Image (cartoon, rainbow, N blue to C red):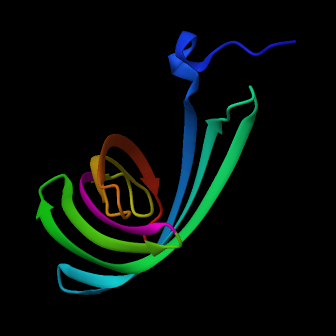
């Protein structure tokens, strides 16, 4: 068996990734500060028709500013994540809509500037969030 060349199947180079983000924020009025942890799992095709999984756990400080609106609020969050592969600066504007007392949902965009040396890259993605505020 001889594997097919990578250039004949270009969409298999980066199969995908998963991210899990958790954080703790303490608010003073509409300004919050705290700590964020992010687990990233990347699935990539290797040279021999196999899939390799790489994980990276990052930590860093986070700040958030809330702008209250009549039917929810707009949040702008900035964080710096440090992990073994380098650093990333993450900027996340999000619109949240409160449903009842204990449930929020939102739409947002997350921009990530990866400062890995020697490569610098940028990633932009949209997301849908669901939460239970305390």
Left or right of 90 on screen, residue 128: right
Percent from the top left, x then y, of residue 111? 27, 51
Quarter holding the N terminus is: top right
Magenta region, mostly helix, strand or loop? Answer: strand
Percent from the top left, x then y, of residue 97? 28, 51
Left or right of 70 on screen, residue 108: right
Query: In the picture shown, does residue 127 fall above or below 103?
Result: above
Query: In the picture shown, does residue 25 fall above or below 93?
Result: below
Q: Residue at x 26, y 82 (%)?
A: 32
Nearer-the-camera pick, 101 or 128: 128
Q: Residue at x 71, y 42 (%)?
A: 52
The answer to whether any part of residue 36 appears in the image is no
Left or right of 48 on screen, residue 120: left
Nearer-the-camera pick, 92 or 12: 12
Q: Residue at x 57, y 14 (%)?
A: 9
Left or right of 114 on screen, residue 31: left
Q: Quadrant of residue 126?
A: top left
Q: Residue at x 56, y 36 (%)?
A: 16
Nearer-the-camera pick, 104 or 54: 54
Nearer-the-camera pick, 104 or 18: 18
Percent from the top left, x then y, of residue 84? 53, 72
113 in the magenta segment: no
Quarter holding the C terminus is: bottom left
88 in the magenta segment: yes
Q: Which residues are magenta?
A: 85-96
The answer to whether any part of residue 87 appears in the image is yes
Percent from the top left, x then y, of residue 55? 63, 58
Q: Residue furthest right?
A: 1
**Total marks placed:** 0
């Amino acid at each position: 068996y001889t594997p097919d060349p990578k250039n004949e199947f270009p969409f298999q180079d980066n199969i995908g990734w998963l991210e899990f983000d958790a954080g703790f924020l303490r608010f003073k009025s509409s300004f919050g500060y705290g700590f964020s942890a992010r687990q990233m799992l990347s699935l990539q095709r290797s040279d021999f028709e196999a899939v390799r999984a790489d994980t990276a756990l990052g930590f860093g400080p986070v700040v958030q500013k809330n702008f209250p609106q009549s039917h929810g609020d707009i949040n702008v969050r900035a964080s710096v994540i440090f992990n073994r592969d380098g650093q990333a600066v993450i900027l996340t504007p999000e619109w949240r809509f409160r449903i009842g007392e204990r449930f929020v949902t939102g739409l947002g965009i997350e921009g990530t500037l990866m400062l890995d040396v020697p490569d610098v890259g940028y990633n932009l993605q949209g997301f849908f969030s669901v939460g239970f505020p305390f």
